[in-house]
Image (cartoon, helix red, strand yellow):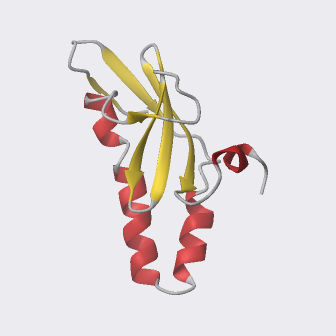
């Protein structure tokens, strides 16, 4: 699990569960462009690394309005994460046009 110093000197952990849908996103995009699919996947894996140093860089998820649940955008995808003490948990990755409520339903 990656670990780096935060701005305030404390250490934080980045937790990315397997159900973040990255594989499904890649398969869908690859139907049209393998190159673009690989690019999107690389950015989706790299994007959370900035959270290790700047965990509050994302905006508060408007549907929840909770300071601990935030999001950053990677292309048209919303990477939604929660700050829990010294951990950052990626909750889900959804397309920006998808309804937020549907993000937590089984596909």
The one nearer the camera, 100 or 4, is: 100
The one nearer the camera, 63 or 57, is: 63
Q: Is residue 22 left or right of residue 104?
A: left
Place of residue 46 in the rendered image (x, y in percent of width and height, measured from the top left): 34, 51
Number of labels in the image equals 0
Residue at position x 36%, y 21% in the image: 12
Place of residue 40 in the rendered image (x, y in percent of width and height, measured from the top left): 41, 66
Residue 11 quadrant: top left
Q: Is residue 45 left or right of residue 81?
A: left
Residue at position x 34%, y 28% in the image: 55
Place of residue 60 in the rendered image (x, y in percent of width and height, measured from the top left): 44, 31
The one nearer the camera, 72 or 47, is: 72
Q: Most extreme residue toward the right, as rendered?
A: 106
Is 84 situated above or below 50? above
Residue at position x 20%, y 19% in the image: 7
Residue 52 quadrant: top left
Place of residue 28 in the rendered image (x, y in percent of width and height, measured from the top left): 60, 75
Residue at position x 57%, y 85% in the image: 31
Is 34 situated above or below 61? below
Location of the C terminus (image quadrant) = bottom right
Is 92 situated above or below 84? below
Is 106 situated above or below 54? below
Q: Most extreme residue toward the bottom, as rendered?
A: 32
Location of the N terminus (image quadrant) = top left
């Amino acid at each position: 699990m990656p670990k780096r110093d935060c701005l305030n000197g404390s250490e934080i952990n980045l937790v990315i569960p397997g159900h973040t849908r990255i594989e499904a996103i890649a398969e869908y995009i690859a139907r049209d462009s393998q190159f673009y699919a690989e690019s999107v996947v690389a950015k989706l894996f790299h994007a959370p690394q900035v959270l290790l140093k700047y965990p509050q860089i994302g905006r508060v998820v408007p549907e929840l309005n909770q300071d601990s649940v935030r999001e950053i955008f990677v292309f048209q995808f919303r990477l939604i994460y929660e700050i829990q003490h010294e951990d950052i948990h990626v909750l889900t990755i959804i397309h920006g046009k998808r309804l937020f409520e549907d993000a937590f339903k089984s596909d």
